[in-house]
Image (cartoon, grey):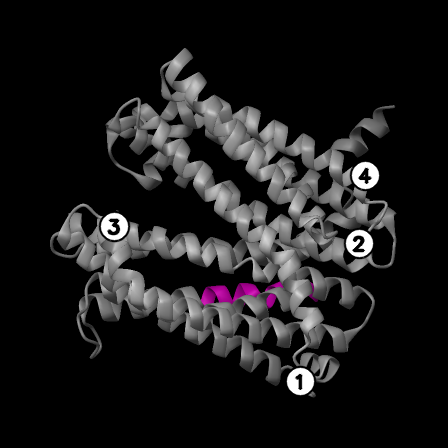
Amino acid sequence: MQNKISSFFIPDSNYSKKILALALPVIAGLSTQMLLSLVDTAMVGRLENSEYTLAAMALGLLATWAIVAFCSSLSTGTHVLVARNFGEKNFVACKDILYNSFILGILIGMVIAAAGWYLSESIAFFVAKDDRVAELTTQYMKYRFLGLPFFLITVAYRGFFFGIGQTKIFMISAIITNLLNILFNYMFIFGEFGAPKMGVAGASIGTSLATVADAAFYTIISFSFKSIRVKFNIFHRLRIMKDTIKAILKLSFPVSLQNVFTLLGFLSFVAVTGLLDTTSQGASQTIISTLFISYLPCNGFGIAVQTLVGNYATSKDSYLVQKYTFETAKIATIFTLLLSIIFIFFPEYLLMITTNNQSIIETAIPGLRVAGVAQIFFGGGMVFAYALQALGKTFYVMLVEMITNLLVFVPLSYLLGIVIFQNLSGAWSALIIYTILYIILMFIKFRKESKVTVN
């Protein structure tokens, strides 16, 4: 009996080694993005009239990030399809999926980049109250949109390399790209090393240039690594395949909507906390930023399980599909459990990473403790969601996100935070219900679908 209980909670080393080999490089790569965000904000915050530049950067990031999050879901469709075909050793199909995702990304990127350049000014003056902030936001958005086609090229490559289990390539790419991003931002924000001084627009130009370098890196890797070039016949006998494009879009579009629902849900939640007072709203934003410490690594575990489930799903090996998913969920839950201890007992130290405003820190501490309890269930829920996406159930995952976030989390945060308890802890306690409901719905569906039925 004791052995059964221990095996239920303790990861099996026979499987965890392979899971961690896939997940850890992704986690390392994603972690460099956090460093970039901190450095970007620090550089823009040191410009003259930083209250304007920081506001413009925040608005520009929010507007463009919504588009980027919507489009980046193409990586999910590519990843899942490549993982399935790689599991069947159909390497030609893997190459065809990459090429069609590549073409799809370029076309979508060019259309949105042109529309974004044209509409940036209208969007900026709509979301910004101050004209100066709107002008700076316009500059930031225009140059950021120009990099979108290259970003979607990297999305196609990322899905391909995730699908074949080469997550270390993503790690190297992320590290190089984010370091270049910091260098380019420094050059164009402050006018160093012969570059023009462009202020907040320079941060956007730096990001777009780094994205171009990232696309070039993946292309060079694809052609220079003989094991990849020969095995997959990269860019040999290329053909546009409507069925492949439809399959990528069918898997990806619900994920796009899911990203939108997540964004809308948390924006609505921050708006709800603003009904308490401005300090509570600022504290909520700080808590959300702190939660990225667990969110990004959990994405790494999600990528790992999506690859493994995709590899074995088409072989109809339901045991390995279930085993890898449950083992990954164990590891992710252990990770979030350990972090929750820090969140609950040492919240002030985490909050000091994102702000030095003592009033915000004191207001955020109780809310972060509540969020720490909620995130215990977050890792497992995300793993089951990624596994379901690998099984083709992206619409179900999107539907659950919409229901649990927009129809449960947000209304409950208002009821508990504003009506009943009238404090920030009450609002954040809705997150516990959200994460528990989320993992239950994902777990039940995964148990049913992991028999295995792939569409």
Check disc 4 and report the residue beneath it. Answer: 448
Image coordinates of residue 229 in percent, x first then y, are 67, 83
Residue visible at 57% across and 74% down?
A: 102
In the rendered structure, which amino acid carries the disc numbered 3? Phe
Magenta-highlighted residues: 163-176
Q: Position of residue 13 (x, y in %)?
A: 77, 46
Q: Spatial distance from mark 1 to mark 4, Cα to Cα?
A: 38 Å
Q: Of marks 3 and 4, which one's residue comes earlier in the chain?
A: 3
Mark 3 falls on what kind of element?
A: helix
- Give the structural element (helix, strand or loop) at label 2: loop
Amino acid type, residue under disc 4 in the picture: Lys
- Give the residue at mark 2: 454
Mark yes or no: residue 211 visible: yes
Q: In which quarter of the image is residue 166?
A: bottom right
Helix, strand or loop under label 1: loop
Q: Distance between the residues labelled 2 and 3?
A: 44 Å
Mark found first going from the N terminus, 2 or 3 = 3
Q: Label 1 amino acid?
A: Leu
The residue under label 3 is: 126
